Image (cartoon, helix red, strand yellow):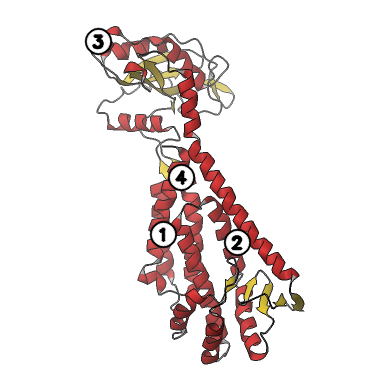
């Protein structure tokens, strides 16, 4: 699967699991601060978990795994066709970044709208924040340390509004909105990001409402103020008195006592997140999709390599500081060299035999290819052909560990395909 499509699929999976977990009644009953942390960590996990890979080596896979060499019975693939395929494979990546750019531009337009509000408003410094008043502002909102209120907002009404917005400022809710906005640029395709953003804004409002009421504000007056502003809309990036939240906020106001998230809540969320991380980020080998199939094939194979007699010779290194080099290049150069010399056996063609031969060999400290063996074979004709070409290998530049030349072991797949179909 294309890398970008794979990233999108895994992000959707992570988003689904984390959002369902957030919606559990157990999580919803805990205090708003913990719910806020859960939402922010979830947003970060959705974006990062699919990008992280931790390699776990299969015990049957020894040493470095080379890219497979193909022996195609129909000859080399048409170059023009291969180039076209390469262009087609990049279409998802191009579309992904095109839409991401559009989302970024839309977000920048919100900031431009904020700038216009400031230009059309009268400014007043009020301690830790700046107050902007204008007739063009329909509903109070805050962004950073700037508070925007309608010009008609005065007296007790203004005091309540400022108490609400000060809560947003002191809790730094704007940072949450900016963070989620940045993640949305690359996660524009993920509906769970938008759901988390909606819930996060709601949590911000619940926290501000709680702070206002605990400070001694009359609940009836506060509700009347919410109803008064419910038909106006503030910019989408702001923390505002949004009409879509009014009913839920009224319900929340009936209970000002919150259940603190204890050790069990933290352990439960941490364990669930780490389990999800292990599912999405741990993989066998940081290799290509084809190589992953090879790893799986070897792991499922009942054939075992013959244990080496460590008493008679040194055990080769599976990883070294400086990897061996082939004809001035890397392992890919060797793969191409082998592919150019493979000959599909005529008997195998006639009997329509094809498959994946997996070999292991050692590049010695002298640069010679030695101890070539079949880890998993397909047919004697194909096995012998793969071994024949590998054993013809010219000398390599040996690998080095702590400045000394050492033996290095490789696992190398050779794939035989009929009709030149790769």
For mark 1, give the secondary structure: helix
Q: Which mark is residue 350?
A: 3
Residue under label 2, please give it: 178
Q: Looking at the picture, tell me which residue is in the foreground, 404 or 177.
A: 177
From what the image shows, is residue 387 above or below residue 84?
above
Q: CA distance from mark 4 to mark 2?
A: 23 Å
Quick check: can you spot residue 12? yes
Q: Please tell me which residue lies in front, 241 or 335.
A: 241
At x 40% / y 75%, what residue is drawn? 29
Please, what secondary structure does the residue beneath circle 3 have?
helix
First along the sequence among labels 3 and 2: 2
Task: Please state which of the two labelled residues, at mark 3 or mark 1, is closer to the viewer.
Answer: 3
What is the quadrant of residue 131 in the picture? Answer: bottom right
| Residue in the image at 57% along x and 90% along y | 217
**Label annotation for residue 18:** 1
3D distance between C-alphas at marks 3 and 2: 64 Å
- Whether residue 258 is visible here, answered yes or no, is no
**Measured along the vertical axis of the image, is residue 360 above or below residue 101?**
above
Whole-angstrom CA distance, mark 1 to mark 2, is 21 Å
Report the side of 256 relative to 380 (left or right): right
Quadrant of the image for the N terminus?
A: top left
User: Which quadrant is home to the C terminus?
Assistant: top left
Q: Find disc 4 in the rendering and name its residue.
A: 7
- Answer with mark 1 or mark 2, whichever residue precedes in sequence: 1
């Amino acid at each position: 699967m294309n890398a970008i499509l794979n990233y999108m699929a895994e992000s959707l999976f992570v988003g689904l699991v984390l959002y369902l977990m957030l919606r559990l009644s157990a999580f919803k009953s805990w205090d708003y601060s913990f719910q806020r942390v859960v939402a922010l960590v979830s947003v970060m996990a959705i974006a990062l978990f699919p990008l992280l890979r931790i390699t776990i080596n299969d015990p049957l896979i020894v040493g470095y795994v080379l890219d497979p060499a193909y022996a195609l019975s129909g000859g080399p693939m048409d170059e023009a066709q291969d180039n076209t395929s390469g262009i087609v494979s990049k279409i998802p990546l191009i579309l992904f970044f095109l839409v991401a750019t559009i989302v970024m531009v839309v977000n920048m337009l919100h900031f431009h709208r904020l700038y216009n509000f400031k230009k059309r408003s009268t400014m007043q410094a009020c301690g830790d924040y700046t107050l902007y008043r204008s007739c063009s502002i329909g509903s109070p909102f805050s962004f950073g340390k700037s508070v925007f209120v309608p010009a008609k907002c005065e007296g007790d009404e203004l005091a309540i509004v400022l108490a609400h917005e000060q809560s947003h400022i002191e809790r730094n809710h704007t940072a949450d909105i900016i963070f989620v906005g940045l993640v949305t640029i690359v996660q524009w395709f993920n509906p769970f990001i938008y759901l988390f953003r909606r819930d996060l804004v709601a949590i911000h409002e619940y926290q501000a409402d709680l702070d206002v009421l605990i400070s001694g504000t009359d609940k009836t007056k506060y509700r009347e103020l919410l109803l008064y502003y419910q038909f106006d809309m503030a910019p989408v990036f702001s923390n505002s008195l949004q009409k879509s939240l009014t009913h839920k906020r009224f319900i929340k106001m009936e209970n000002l006592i919150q259940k603190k998230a204890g050790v069990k809540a933290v352990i439960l969320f941490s364990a669930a997140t780490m389990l999800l991380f292990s599912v999405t980020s741990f993989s066998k080998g940081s290799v290509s999709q084809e190589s992953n199939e090879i790893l799986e094939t070897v792991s499922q194979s009942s054939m075992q390599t013959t244990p080496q007699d460590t008493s008679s010779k040194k055990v080769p290194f599976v990883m070294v500081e400086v990897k061996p080099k082939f004809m001035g290049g890397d392992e890919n150069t060797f793969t191409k060299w082998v592919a150019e010399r493979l000959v599909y056996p005529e008997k195998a063609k006639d009997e329509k035999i094809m498959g994946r031969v997996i070999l292991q060999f050692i590049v010695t400290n002298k640069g010679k290819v030695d101890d070539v063996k079949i880890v998993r074979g397909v047919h004697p004709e194909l096995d012998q052909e793969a071994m024949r070409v590998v054993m013809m290998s010219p000398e390599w530049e040996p690998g080095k560990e702590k400045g000394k030349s050492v033996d290095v072991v490789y696992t190398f797949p050779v794939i035989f395909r009929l009709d030149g179909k790769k």
